[in-house]
Image (cartoon, rainbow, N blue to C red):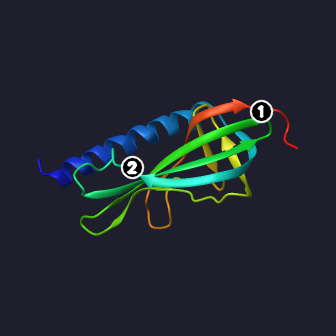
Amino acid sequence: MDGYNADVKRIVAIALLEIAVCGWSLGQERGQDISFHVTAVRSEDATDWCPTGECDATRITVEGYSATTEYVLDCVEVITHKPSPHYADYCDHVHAHNDYDATLWPANIGFKPIKSKTADGAPVSLYRIVSEKEISKRK
């Protein structure tokens, strides 16, 4: 199996797993509407996603809070190169020092409007909750 096919199969398997988990969360629970204040955003290469170089993956980490809970979130955005460059998985982009309407599920947060695909048809992932911490009331 060539490197491209291995990368594509791995991306598809991970995306299907994420969709299944997200779909299960969405189907099992309505989610809680929240206001999410973003305090920091950073991105870095997600080298564990495309080891053969047939795609590029970027891990986007978002820090912020809602009410009295502080969160660290992440999402991996993937661009495959063949047959032509296109998103295989897309993450909503947010910016520090902004408030966003969002929905909280047990393991994920989605920024509104929550969509399953972009206008180009790329799947849109929810942000995975990496950590959460109770904080005292913000000043």
Foreground residue among 114 and 109: 109
Q: Which secondary structure lies at badge 2?
A: loop
Q: Residues within 10 Å of mark 2 (few under 14, many from 20)?
A: some
On residue 3, the disc is none
24 left or right of 100 in image: left
Q: Is residue 67 visible?
A: yes
Image location of residue 132, percent across then percent down? 65, 33
Classify residue 121 by image quadrant.
bottom left
Q: Extreme left residue here?
A: 1
- Marks 2/1 in contact by CB < 8 Å: the verdict is no
Q: Quadrant of residue 137?
A: top right
Q: Quadrant of residue 123?
A: bottom left
Find residue 52 and report its horizontal and vertical position in percent. 22, 52
Task: Give the numbered dot on residue 46.
Answer: 2
Residue furthest to the bottom = 84
Earlier along the polypeptide chain: callout 2 or callout 1? 2
Q: Residue at x 88, y 44 (%)?
A: 139
What numbered label is drawn on residue 135?
Answer: 1
Residue at image point 68% right, 57% down: 96
| Residue 9: image location, x then y, percent | 25, 46
Residue at 36% across / 65% down in the picture?
86
The answer to whether residue 115 is seen in the rendering is no
Q: Give above or below for 134 relative to 11.
A: above
- Answer above or below: position of 131 versus 90: above
As drawn, is 1 to the left or to the right of 75?
A: left
Q: Is residue 35 left or right of residue 16?
A: right
Q: As shown in the figure, which amino acid type bears the numbered disc 2?
A: Ala
Q: CA distance from mark 2 to mark 1?
A: 30 Å
